[in-house]
Image (spheres, rainbow, N blue to C red):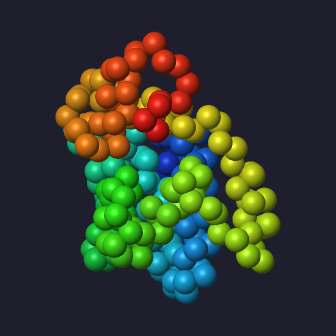
């Protein structure tokens, strides 16, 4: 499965907290997608999108663009090497590039919406799925501890933006993190803009 190769790859380049977050996002988004009846190919695309959604925070993909775009480009290249059809690769790219864009990601298609909802659920901004399979989901999520993800992720985004401010434009999530850091460089723990 391409999803297995994606997990192996992101595990080799991302910090453990970010890998665990990405897997939790996958588990949450996959359950939501299964409840909506997405097919096997869409589920695999969703897995890759979730696993790569923060790949742009890694040193391996620390290019000049926002981390969301760098991660989307990394997933595009990864899927192209696996001979995926371009329209499906584009959906994965959009899901990753837009995952920090509230109100847009939710309207750009199934993958974009599910990745965004998975991220929101993992960070507690929305309730995780409930129902008969919720206990199994909670057990699966428990296998991937948070490892202070809010601090680790924000610090990774800010560290890149300090070196390349263009990676954190104003009025974006990375821009908010950078502005909060610059306003209080002595702050420790989770970035208040998180």
Question: Can you see residue 59?
Answer: no
User: Is residue 116 among what the camera can see?
Assistant: yes
Q: Position of residue 95 (x, y in %)?
A: 37, 64
Count all numbered tags in the image, as a single digit: 0
Q: Tell me the residue at 27%/74% (across/down).
A: 86
Image-based side of 15 in relation to 80, left or right: right
The residue positioned 43% from the left and 53% from the top of the image is: 53
Residue that sits furthest to the top in the current view:
186
Classify 188 as above or below 10: above
Residue 98 is left or right of residue 193, and the answer is left
Residue 149 placement (x, y as % from top left): 57, 38
Q: Is 125 on the left or on the right of 178, as rendered?
A: right
Q: Quadrant of the N terminus?
A: bottom right
Establish if 191 lies above or below 11: above
Residue 59 placement (x, y as % from top left): 39, 34
Q: In the image shown, does 97 or 123 lie closer to the viewer?
A: 123
Q: Nearer the viewer, residue 95 or 132?
A: 132
x then y, percent, for residue 148: 62, 34
Residue at the (29%, 69%) spot, across then down:
90
Q: Residue at x 44, y 54 (%)?
A: 52
């Amino acid at each position: 499965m391409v999803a297995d190769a994606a997990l192996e790859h992101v595990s080799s380049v991302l910090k453990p907290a970010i890998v665990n977050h990405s897997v939790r996002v996958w588990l949450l988004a996959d359950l939501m997608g299964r409840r909506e009846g997405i097919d096997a190919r869409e589920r695999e695309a969703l897995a890759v999108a979730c696993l790569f959604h923060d790949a742009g925070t890694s040193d391996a993909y620390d290019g000049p663009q926002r981390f969301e775009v760098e991660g989307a480009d990394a997933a595009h290249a990864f899927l192209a090497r696996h001979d995926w059809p371009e329209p499906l690769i584009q959906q994965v790219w959009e899901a990753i590039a837009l995952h920090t864009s509230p109100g847009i990601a939710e309207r750009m298609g199934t993958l974009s919406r599910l990745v965004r909802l998975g991220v929101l659920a993992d960070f507690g901004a929305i309730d995780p799925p409930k129902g008969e399979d919720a206990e199994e989901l909670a057990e699966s999520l428990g296998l991937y501890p948070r490892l202070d993800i809010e601090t680790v992720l924000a610090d990774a985004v800010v560290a890149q933006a300090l070196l390349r401010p263009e990676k954190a434009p104003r009025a974006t999530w990375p821009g908010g993190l950078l502005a909060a850091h610059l306003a209080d460089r002595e702050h420790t723990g989770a970035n208040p803009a998180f």
